[in-house]
Image (spheres, grey):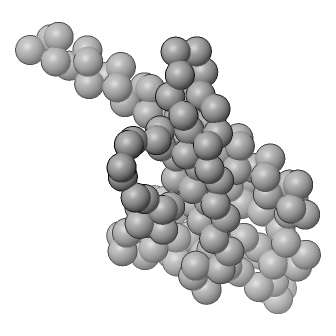
Amino acid sequence: MWEWLRRRRSASQAARRLGRRGERVAARHLRRSGLRIVGKNVQVGRSEVDLVALDGDTVVLVEVKSRTVTANVEWTGLDRVDANKRRALRRAGAILRGRVRGGDENFRVDAVSVEFEKRSVGHRVVDLRWYPGILKV
């Protein structure tokens, strides 16, 4: 039983590392595309927003989905943003809108999917897709 727990813990640690790496790659891509990253792993209410960015006067909440490539598996980042996550992102946007002075800013939710090639040392980005405006807040 303890061996099972150790394997689970190490697998979840590996998934967290991959997720953090994906967030760094996504942030770099968004910065290069003209957005300004103003927050990472922001706790808003009971939800966590991976990245918060500014696109002009629009506040952008970004959900990042990362994975290693699996042969013959079609997947997009949008597939992984389920109804519960969309609800949580809308709630987070509403909370942030209430915190912003004046509240004149526009809000939107974007998704970024990052696929990595699994190698013996590190991971190489195979595909990155940015889906702007998947939700209005």
Residue 81: % across, % down: 44, 66
Residue that sits furthest to the front in the current view: 72
Q: Nearer the viewer, residue 24 or 85?
A: 24
Residue that sits furthest to the top in the current view: 3
Is residue 67 shown above or below 1?
Answer: below
The answer to whether residue 21 is visible is yes
Q: Residue at x 72, y 60 (%)?
A: 52
Q: Residue at x 36, y 74 (%)?
A: 83
Quadrant for residue 117, please give it. Answer: top right
The answer to whether residue 94 is visible is no
Residue 2: % across, % down: 15, 11
Q: Residue at x 34, y 26 (%)?
A: 11
Residue 84: % across, % down: 36, 70
Q: Nearer the viewer, residue 103 or 22?
A: 22
Residue that sits furthest to the left in the current view: 1
Q: Residue at x 65, y 80 (%)?
A: 133
Is residue 27 shown above or below 104?
Answer: above
